[in-house]
Amino acid sequence: MADALHELSAAELGRRLASGAFTSRALCEALIARHRTLNDKVGAFTHLDQADVLAQADASDVRRKAGQGRGPLEGIPVGIKDNIAVKGQPLTCSSKMLAPLVSPYDSHVAERLRAAGAILFGRLNMDEFAMGSSTENSAFRKAFNPWDLERIPGGSSGGSAAALAAGLVPLALGSDTGGSIRQPASHCGVVGLKPTYGLISRFGLVAFASSLDQIGPMARSVEDCALLLDALASADARDMTCFGPSGRALTPAGDARKLRIGVPKGFLGKGVATEVAAAVNAAVEFYRSQGCAVSEVELPSADLAVPTYYVVATAEASSNLGRYDGVRYGHRSAVSGTPVEMMTASRSEGFGPEVKRRILLGTFVLSAGYADAYYVRALRARAKIRAEYLAALSGVDVLLTPTVPTPAFKVGEKAADPLQLYLEDVFTIPANLAGLPAISVPCGASGRLPVGFHLVGAPLSESKLLAAGRLFEDAHGYAHQQAPL
Amino acid sequence: MAEGFDIDHLAKLARLSLTAEEKALYASQLGQVLGHFQALAKADLPATADDARVVDESALRSDEPGPVLGVEAVTRLAPASRDGQISVPRVVDDES
């Protein structure tokens, strides 16, 4: 029995825990044993406090026994990306800059998970400060794709996706600034949802680019993803951009067969691998066969999305990361000298190459004489992209594309070419720029490498995205799939 | 390389100390990225940017005191502290 626990969905685990089939302690012990065997191979977690996990599990078992269970997530482990604060646990963003930090407080989402009875299970690997698409930028260890250990799991929430695909945890939190939940979900064959900007509080999420960052759920099925989303979303006065769900349902709702699906014109032509295009076209045909109206839509400024994103995101990052100077926050260099020399040495020692690259780029696009040409024009382009997406979504319910143009690449393959890595995000970035909800759902494979499709909807249309994903998932065999390790 | 991209000046502004190899590498890589950004220079764009708000619901709330971390929890995070206060290196330069 214990051997198979890692194969069950969170929903099924919840049902069996409720029926008394096993305890949360037994579940957590099974996952800890699996972690011991597999994490060195996969590199999904950077830290797992076993004693803390088992103490949480015991507390959950006591609550359940006393008839005080807190709902469907009671006793179920949730892995947490290492840029989301959990009291008493490391908060490093996979960076040497923050390496010794132990969070003195819970993020809003950690509070929500505790209130739901979930077990906060370990710290998940990521690209340093969430900057990257491969988890190769972690300062501590690389993560690998469980479907092919020579390949990247995607990023920046690569640890979250890899942990799910490897059966190390049934649910995980990621964060998404330009695709960091959806791109690794696609590469690892799991489901990842980036909510509408403002649906989930960012209190306790270490800032990368504040106007784009969102925390979101990741799981091995749409049903589980919805379960986690429902627990996370609530208004929070500590994040002034968070309005919460305001009474809206966050579970799959409505008849997905009646959805109108828009396919952006020309999207499948742009550097999309043949196998990816075939799998995504098959998904489009599936929806058509179910009765959905499928039409082509125009998004004339799609080509502006990547440059717009990398101007806005790096500008905000260069500002947000200014606080890591060895005085206000972060690693302090032993180099003595003037204050500026000490701060410069602290930043140079603490940050890795990709973070430095983005800080330099952000500094340039905000610098005197260039801000108008880059930053201000990017803000205007962002408004245009957003207007085009909202216009397209007034005629259809969802927009369907691949999540990523190509399957997972080999570790090191694109490390020397940042521009190629940035172009990985071409389909996911517009949802962040426009603040829209989006989901990646597995839809096939290229060889053994998973492929996902991507749905974007109007603000607060999460229930439609989940319903559409659920319809596809129910008709195909991808839900709950794990890599053969 | 995009006009005005001066790696030495930017490193100084960003408070980063770079080796000669790093400067050459970042200048070359970011040159390619900035080349890609030229699409922005050529695009026909609206005159103004909106505030990127997607849901028209006010998140402003009254300014009321809430719970805060205790002194002990905060000083424990600092590299050095004394008498309940955080000790930092001298940050006011004599020359400034």
Image: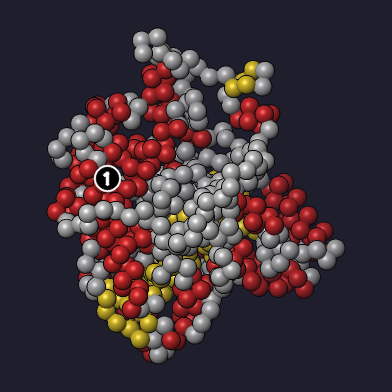
The reply, left or right, for residue A224 in relation to residue A342 is right
Q: Nearer the viewer, residue A383 or B8?
A: A383
Residue occupying the point 52% across, 51% down: B60
Q: Position of residue B54 (x, y in %)?
A: 41, 61
Q: Position of residue B14 (x, y in %)?
A: 33, 30
Q: How many marks can you see?
A: 1
SS under mark 1: helix
Among the 4 quarters of the image, the one containing residue A375: top left
Q: Please report, as a chain letter, where disc 1 is located.
A: A
Residue occupying the point 27% across, 73% down: A264
| A463 relative to B20, above or below | below
Q: Position of residue A195 (x, y in %)?
A: 48, 62
Among the 4 quarters of the image, the one containing residue A337: top left
Residue at the top extreme, as displayed: B94
Three-letter amino acid code of the residue under disc 1: Tyr
On the question of residue A206 being in view, the answer is yes
Quadrant in which the N terminus of chain B is drawn: top left
On the question of residue A466 being in view, the answer is no
Classify mark 1: residues with Cα within 10 Å, few (<14), some (14-19) or many (20+). many
Q: Which residue is mark 1?
A: A375
Residue occupying the point 73% across, 63% down: A70
Residue occupying the point 47% across, 76% down: A464
